[in-house]
Image: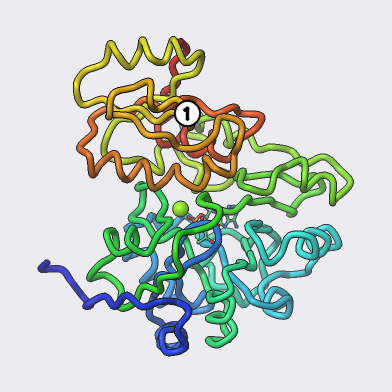
Amino acid sequence: MTDSKFITKLMPSKSDEALSLGAEYLRKGEVVAIPTETVYGLAGNAMSEGAVAKIYEAKGRPSDNPLIVHISSLQMWEQLVEKITDDARLLAEKFWPGPLTIILPKSERVPMKTTGGLDTVAVRMPSHKDTLRLIELSDIPIAAPSANLSGLPSPTSAEHCMRDLEGKIPLILDGGECDVGIESTIISLCNDTPILLRPGKITAEQLGAVLKKPVKISEAVLNPLKKGEKAFSPGMKYKHYSPKAKVILVRGSLEGFKNRFNNSPKGTYALVFKGEEEEFSQRAAAYGFEHDADSQSKNIFSLLRRMDDLGAELVLVRCPHEDEALGVYNRLLRAAAFDVEEV
Ligand code: TXA
Ligand code: MG
C-alpha cells in the first residue's frame, strides 16, 4: 500500500495494555477504532478540531455530516450541552448506557467541526464495557462515527474495520462481534415535540412511553430527500450502507420472491429469513427470523459485506416488516437506494 500512514495494530479491547495505548492515542489527537454494542466506531477527541479532521479524512466522510459524541458520565454530558432538559434526563436514566443518541443544543465548548456546523450536539453513553473504560481512562468525550469507509455497510467486527481502515489509523481495539448490529436510535429533543431521526433497537414507542408523549418519526426515516431539500440529520442522505452489488428490496410472498430470484441473472444472491434459505440454491443466506428485529439487526451489515466477498452483482433481499423492524428496514432502504419491488 502506498498511501499507508500507519502499520495498524489490532489488539483485544479487554487488555489493559490495549486500553492504555488507546487512551494515549486519543489524548494525543490520533484516531482509533473501538467496539460498541451497536457497531464499531472511529474514535477521536471530540473537543479537538485536529482529531475530528482526522476522523473525517480516514473515513472519507463529507465534513457537513456531524459526529456522535460518546461519554462515560453525566458530568461529561453537562460540558457538551447548553442544558440537560428533564426529558433528556428521563431518557438517559432509562436507556444509558445503551444504544440511544440524544440531540440537544450544544455548548460553546464543542467545536463546530464536530457537529458539522450545527448548533446542536448528538451524545450517547455506549454500553460496551471496554469502551466505557477507554473513555474514562482518556477522560475526554469521544467523537465516533461508524468505523466504515463512507457509504459502505457499518462494521460489526474488528475485521471489518481492518478491511476499511488498515494503514489509515494506528490501532483497532477488538471487542468481538457487536451485540446489536445496527447503529443507535437517534432522538432530537431540541424542539417541543421529540423527533426520531434514526430508528434503532430502542423504538419510538419505548421512548414515547418514558416521555409520556408521542415521538414523531422524521420523514427522512422512510423517504429519500426531495431534490434540493436539506437533511435534518445529514447522515440520512440517499445512498448509504451499500455493498458494491446492486441491492433490491423485494416485498411480498416467499413464492413471489422465489420467482423473482429464479428469473434473475447468474450473479444474483438472495438474503432471506431464517428457515427459507434451504428453498434456494447456495446463492442464499438468512439474515434473521422474519418477526425478530434483533436477529435481523445482528447480521444484516456483515451479510451485505459478505455479498461483495462472494462477487454478487445483484442482491435481492426479503423485505423486513416495517412495523416490527423499522431500523433494519431503514438501513436496507438506503442500501437499496430506495429500490423496492412488490411481488
Ligand atoms: O451506534 C452509533 O450511533 C454508532 C456508534 C459508533 O456509536 N455511531 C454512528 O455514527 O452511527 P455515524 O456518524 O455513523 O452516524 C451519526 C448520525 C449521522 O446520521 C449524523 O448525521 C447524525 O447522527 N447526527 C449527528 N449529530 C447530529 C446533529 N447534531 N443533528 C442531527 N443529526 C446528527
Ligand atoms: Mg455511519
The type of residue carrying mark 1 is: Gly
Which residue appears farthest toward the left when viewing the image? 2
Residue lying at 51% horizontally and 62% vertically, measured from the top left: 67
Where residue 111 sits, quadrant-wise, is: bottom right
Q: Could you tell me residue 39's position as x and y percent?
A: 48, 57
Circle 1 sits on which residue? 275
Q: Could you tell me residue 54's position as x and y percent?
A: 36, 71
Which residue appears farthest toward the right when viewing the image? 212
Determine the secondary structure under disc 1: loop
Closer-to-camera residue (315/41): 315
- Vertical arrangement, residue 123 with respect to residue 293, above or below: below
Residue lying at 63% horizontally and 64% vertically, measured from the top left: 123
- Vertical arrangement, residue 169 with respect to residue 89, above or below: below
Q: Could you tell me residue 133's position as x and y percent?
A: 57, 81
Q: Could you tell me residue 134's position as x and y percent?
A: 53, 81
Residue lying at 66% horizontally and 61% vertically, measured from the top left: 98
Give the position of the N terminus as an image quadrant: bottom left
Give the image's coloring scheme.
Answer: rainbow
Residue lying at 38% horizontally and 80% vertically, measured from the top left: 30
Closer-to-camera residue (90/309): 309
